[in-house]
Image (cartoon, rainbow, N blue to C red):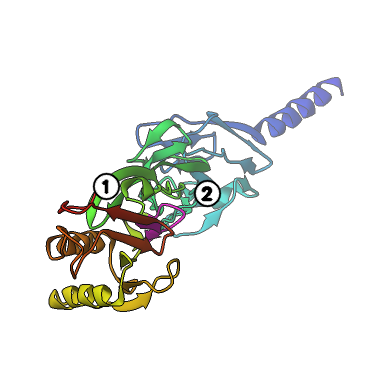
């Protein structure tokens, strides 16, 4: 009776041993792994992946296949030569015994985020390890692109290529402001220039310092407050004060003779009574002479009027009255040809 119990115990122990078997496999250069047990031949190809363990335990005809890892990919299971899919949990090892299994993979999609800082670009916003992507060159009005900073880039870099990479990525566009030229023209001539950054304030120069009192500066034609993304030409708006020429007062006959001098030169004028000396008359032009023209007429009548005595046409005093409020007068004595 005692001997019989010992024999039954050995049989039970042997049964348990046959239902707990250990399969060992080795990885070769093709990542094909052969698993051997006392009863099974398991062939697994990692298909580019790597295995972290080197054994498979078969228990009660069930097994858990190893899960490989592959850079940039998600493992999605195994397939055999007949394209039958398997998970890592095998309920019946006979289903894969003596079959060649290959790992199958999905490339992981990663995001690419951009901070264009006001610029524009045709961007690719995701990638996988299988892609080779060159970051675009963005554009921004009034600025020059100096490069990308972000994932793996501490300093601005213009040429950035993503190849055989993994992980979400983020990039920021860096810019330098462009400078353009402002040309200031006065009376058709270039007066001065300024270099101004895009969208910066343009200096509103006062050109009055270049002009005499008979010319007034009224700002710039083509003016813009902020610098555009191109050179700017500004032209001074200038108005000129016009003057009337007035001769000295005297007898009506003398004034008439002076008017004839004007007419002989092709000028116009009118004989009027002097507002300050009633009974005396003078020749007055309209306010249609520039200051230079008034000076020219003053010099002409000095040459063509009597200055030696008081005979007609005698002229001892002449003045200009201008629309800017400035008046100038000149006198000469008998025998003096030119006005003081």
Q: Is residue 336 left or right of residue 272?
A: left
Residue at 36%, 52% (x, y): give it: 213
How far across and how far down the image is residue 327, in percent? 38, 57
* Corner quadrant of residue 291: bottom left
Residue ID for mark 2: 111
How far across and how far down the image is residue 205, in percent? 40, 47
Residue 322, above or below 185: below
Q: Are marks 1 and 2 in contact (CB under 8 Å)?
A: no
Q: How many marks?
A: 2
Query: For the view shown, which residue lies furthest in the right direction?
Result: 1
What segment carries the magenta color? Answer: 214-228
How far across and how far down the image is residue 228, in percent? 39, 55
Residue ID for mark 1: 191
User: N-terminal of the two: label 1 or label 2?
Assistant: 2
Residue 16, above or below 91: above
Residue at 53%, 46% (x, y): give it: 74
Residue 44, above or below 154: below
Between 327 and 100, the residue placed more toward the observer is 327
Q: Is residue 302 left or right of residue 212?
A: left
Mark 2, secondary structure of its residue: strand
Q: Is residue 230 visible?
A: no
The label on residue 312 is: none
Between 109 and 32, the residue placed more toward the observer is 109
* Corner quadrant of residue 246: bottom left
Between 188 and 117, the residue placed more toward the observer is 188
Query: Any magenta on residue 124?
Result: no
């Amino acid at each position: 009776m005692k001997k019989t119990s010992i024999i039954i115990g050995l049989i039970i122990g042997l049964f348990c041993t046959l239902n707990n078997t250990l399969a060992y496999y080795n990885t070769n250069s093709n990542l094909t792994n052969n698993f051997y047990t006392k009863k099974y031949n398991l062939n697994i190809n990692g298909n580019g992946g790597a295995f972290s363990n080197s054994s498979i335990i078969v228990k009660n005809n069930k097994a858990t296949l190893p899960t490989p890892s592959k850079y940039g990919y998600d493992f999605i299971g195994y397939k055999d030569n007949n394209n039958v899919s398997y998970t890592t949990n095998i309920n019946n090892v006979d289903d894969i015994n003596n079959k060649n299994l290959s790992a199958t993979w999905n490339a992981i999609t990663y995001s690419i985020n951009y901070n264009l800082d006001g610029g524009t670009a045709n961007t690719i916003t995701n990638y996988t390890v299988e892609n080779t992507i060159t970051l675009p060159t963005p554009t921004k009005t009034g600025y020059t692109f100096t490069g990308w900073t972000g994932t793996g880039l501490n300093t601005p870099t213009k040429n950035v290529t993503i190849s055989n990479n993994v992980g979400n990525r983020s990039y920021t566009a860096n810019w330098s402001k462009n400078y353009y030229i402002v040309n200031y023209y006065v009376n058709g001539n270039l007066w001065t220039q300024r270099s101004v950054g895009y969208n910066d304030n343009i200096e509103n120069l006062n050109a009055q310092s270049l002009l005499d009192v008979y010319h007034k500066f009224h700002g710039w034609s083509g003016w813009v407050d902020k610098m555009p993304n191109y050179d700017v030409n500004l032209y001074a708006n200038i108005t000129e004060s016009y003057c009337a020429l007035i001769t000295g007062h005297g007898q009506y006959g003398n004034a008439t003779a002076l008017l004839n001098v004007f007419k002989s030169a092709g000028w116009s004028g009118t004989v009027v009574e002097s507002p300050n000396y009633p009974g005396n008359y003078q020749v007055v032009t309209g306010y249609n002479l520039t200051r230079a023209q008034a000076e020219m007429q003053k010099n002409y009548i000095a040459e063509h009027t009597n200055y030696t005595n008081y005979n007609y046409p005698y002229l001892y005093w002449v003045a200009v009255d201008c629309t800017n409020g400035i008046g100038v007068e000149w006198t000469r004595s008998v025998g003096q040809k030119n006005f003081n």
